[in-house]
Amino acid sequence: MRVVIGGGSGFVGRELTRLLKSKGHEITIISRQPGPGKITWADVESGGLPPCEGAVNLAGESILNPLRWWNESYKKDLFSSRINTTRILAQAIAASPTPPHSWVLVTGVACYKPSLQTQYTEQSDWTPFDFLSRLVKEWEGAGQLPENSAQKTRQVIIRPGAVLGRDGGAMKQMMIPFWLGLGGTLGSGRQPFPWIHVSDLAGIIAHSLGPHEGPSSTEPDVFNGVAPALNTNFEFTKELGRALKRPTIFPVPGFFLDVVLGSERAVILTQGQKVVPKRTLESGFNFQYPDLTSALKEIVG
């Protein structure tokens, strides 16, 4: 199978590329810079989609980039880096004489309103309520194919939680303070912490690109990209401390995160959602790392 991956040079993209190549698939990465095995977004806009059986979009400016202040310029970049690239791919798929069988868009769980009680599955209704949920709404809308194209190409949306792995994502920024014994809970620590190991997220994407059984639909299939375990920030903090054999006695107050990150962005860390991968499990996907103990052992080990 030939797969085109937008944003394939990033943390999740590297893991997905490695997995797909190990299964014998041929990968083309869409990137800002040309190179071997790569094309640019401008190439796709001008020349259309290269022949492929699957297309994936992972592109987007990092929301927790510690080097960017939370301001209008950054928020504009968060929107444009996701929505523009998604729209380019969706339009290229719709215009292709031989469109791919599958179109996978990876967004996020920020669409679900933070709650200590409510459990969200893929069937849960939601409406935008803040900056990040509006971002997800527009992002997923940009990926929607016209009905005649959706009859030929299966649309999939995957909504991951915090992506954990050795080479990037949330763990990269957390490891140094935890190694130094300066790790601690964020805010109250009671907030849910939806997470997934990067290998499992790559696995769900690859699973979604494969042959689909069941009735075809012009609406996207939605899968929550989170581990089956329901954990809080406190449980994650203690488990990571145990894995590193380090104390976790320095809690980070919520107001400090609001000041440093901006309150609209800090909610990612200080609030959370109980998200369940109901349809992901029903699809037959088997998690390699269904719990924190196994995931952190692989990452820290």
Image (spheres, rainbow, N blue to C red):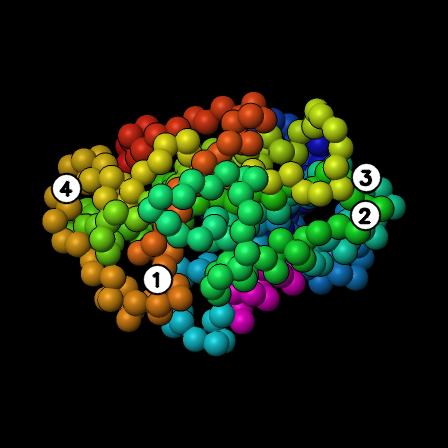
Q: Earlier in the sequence, mark 4 or mark 2?
A: 2
Q: Quadrant of the N terminus?
A: top right
Q: Amino acid at mark 4?
A: Arg
Q: Is residue 282 above or below residue 80?
A: above
Mark 1 lies on residue: 266
Q: What type is the residue that disc 3 sits on?
A: Lys
Q: Of the residues shown, which amino acid type is indicated by label 1? A: Ala
| Residue 235 drawn at (x, y percent) | 24, 39
User: What element does badge 1 sit on?
Assistant: helix
Give the Cα separation between the discs numbered 3 and 2. Answer: 9 Å
Residue 36, given in percent of the width and then of the height, sits at 64, 49
Q: Is residue 279 rendered to the left or right of residue 211?
A: left
Q: Is residue 10 magenta?
A: no
- Looking at marks 4 and 1 on the same chain, the residue that comes earlier in the sequence is marked by 4
Magenta stretch, residue numbers: 76-85
What whole-number distance in Å separates the C-alpha atoms at marks 3 and 1?
40 Å
Front label number (4 vs 1): 1
Residue 285 spot, x, y in % from top left: 54, 26
Q: CA distance from mark 4 to mark 3?
A: 53 Å
Q: Are marks 4 and 3 in contact (CB under 8 Å)?
A: no
Which residue matches tag 2? 147
Name the image quarter holding residue 51: top right
81 inside magenta stretch: yes
Circles 3 and 1 in contact, beta carbons < 8 Å: no
* Residue 246 numbered mark, or none: 4
Q: Of marks 3 and 1, which one's residue comes earlier in the chain?
A: 3
Q: Identity of the amino acid at label 2? A: Glu
